[in-house]
Amino acid sequence: MSEKIAVITGASGHIGYALIKELEAREEKFRILIRSKNKIFEGIPCESAFGDVTDPKSLEKAFEGADTVYHLAGVIDIGTGNEDLTREVNVQGTINVVEACKKCGVRRLVYASSVDILKALPGNEPMTEEICDSAAEVHGIYAKTTAEATRYVLEKSGDKL
């Protein structure tokens, strides 16, 4: 049986880098998906795969042999940024990740969403993923695209991921 390896998308972000440090401390084997060389990864004992969440073929190559994928990549756009890029990365990128996981036989997908996808509730009602029925119920391109992506993950990952 081959050694388990995890793959991280969004490794250069805050959560991604914290995850790298945690996996490194546990001496777990992992691979990072990167678009280009980055000095912050120098000296970190991991594999690198060059690619992008918007490129399904690069994901399939990066996920080869992976047991777990941590999908943390995304565009956080809370202003008047590039809506097309935000949608391409947050929605289509997540679709690509889910489908590449299925195609490559990844056992587990860990997806980081955002509290921004949750609509406000009156009183002290508990919040769960189920209260986000539609991207139309949240405001801003980041919240809308993240809500769409989260819905896709919940609906399409099934019990196999």
Image (spheres, rainbow, N blue to C red):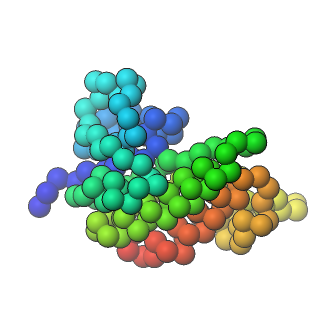
Which residue is painted at 11% across and 61% down in the image? 1
The spot of residue 67 in percent (x, y) is: 28, 59
Q: Residue at x 34, y 49 (%)?
A: 7
Q: Is residue 147 visible to us here?
A: yes
Residue at the far left: name it. Answer: 1
Task: Say whether residue 28 is visible.
Answer: no
Q: Nearer the viewer, residue 27 or 101?
A: 101
Q: Quadrant of the C terminus?
A: bottom left
**Residue 51 x/y as whole percent:** 36, 47
Left or right: 150 as drawn, with respect to 133: left
Furthest residue toward right:
122
Question: In the picture, residue 120 is in which quadrant?
Answer: bottom right
> What residue sits 60% from the left and 49% below the top?
85
Q: Can you tell which quarter of the image residue 57 is in?
A: bottom left
**Residue for point 41% across, 68% down:** 99
Q: What x and y, as percent, mark residue 146? A: 63, 57
